[in-house]
Amino acid sequence: MKLFFASIICVLTSSVSFSQAGILGTWQPEGKQAIFKIFEKDGKYYGQLIGSTNPEEDKRIKSNDEIILLRNLEKESVKEYCCGVFIAPENKTKLSASLTLVNKNKIKLTLSKGWFGKTIIWNRI
């Protein structure tokens, strides 16, 4: 019986800590060198480019303090975030953005402009 209650407490504790962490933290898009930090400010979520696995690119990024490419995401549920904007660094295009928390170490970023869309997987690092 003690083992049963201990198991229940572990499950509840892990699900609470999972929901608190959510999308906050450091992430890297699959197949990319960029490193992002997702943070919360005034009830909205932002993604700041903080580094790169490429040393030259990392130096350039770190010399520019505030490269916030993902902006104004709103939390809809424990796993869903919507209504944000992503600014593509290559051409400064603004794209609609939403995030889905797949598991504690993976998020799915969906970007769209008009009829065109793209999904990118980011992994926690």
Image (cartoon, rainbow, N blue to C red):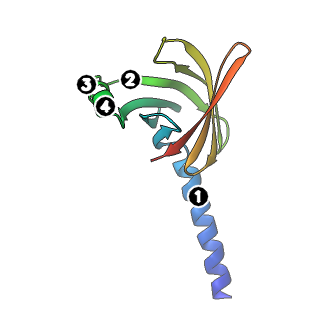
- Look at mark 2 in the image and give the residue it sits on: 67
From the image, which quarter does the N terminus lie in?
Answer: bottom right
Tell whether 41 sits left or right of 97.
left
Q: Residues within 10 Å of mark 4 (few under 14, many from 20)?
A: some
- Mark 1 lies on a secondary structure that is helix
- Mark 3 lies on a secondary structure that is helix
Q: Amino acid at mark 4?
A: Asp
- Look at mark 1 in the image and give the residue it sits on: 16
Residue 53: % across, % down: 36, 37
Tell whether 32 sits left or right of 80.
left
At x 32% / y 26%, what residue is drawn? 61
Which of the two marks, 3 or 1, is nearer to us in this view?
Answer: 3
> Looking at this view, is 100 or 51 the one in front?
51
Q: Amino acid at mark 3?
A: Ser
**With respect to residue 50, does 60 lie above or below?**
above
- Look at mark 3 in the image and give the residue it sits on: 63
Tell whether 58 sits left or right of 6.
left
Mark number for residue 107?
none
- Look at mark 4 in the image and give the residue it sits on: 58
Mark-to-mark CA distance, 1 and 2: 31 Å
Which of the two marks, 4 or 1, is nearer to us in this view?
Answer: 4
Mark-to-mark CA distance, 3 and 1: 37 Å
At x 68% / y 22%, what residue is drawn? 117
Which of the two marks, 1 or 2, is nearer to us in this view?
Answer: 2
Mark-to-mark CA distance, 4 and 1: 35 Å
Which of the two marks, 3 or 4, is nearer to us in this view?
Answer: 4
Q: List the single residue furthest toward the right.
A: 115
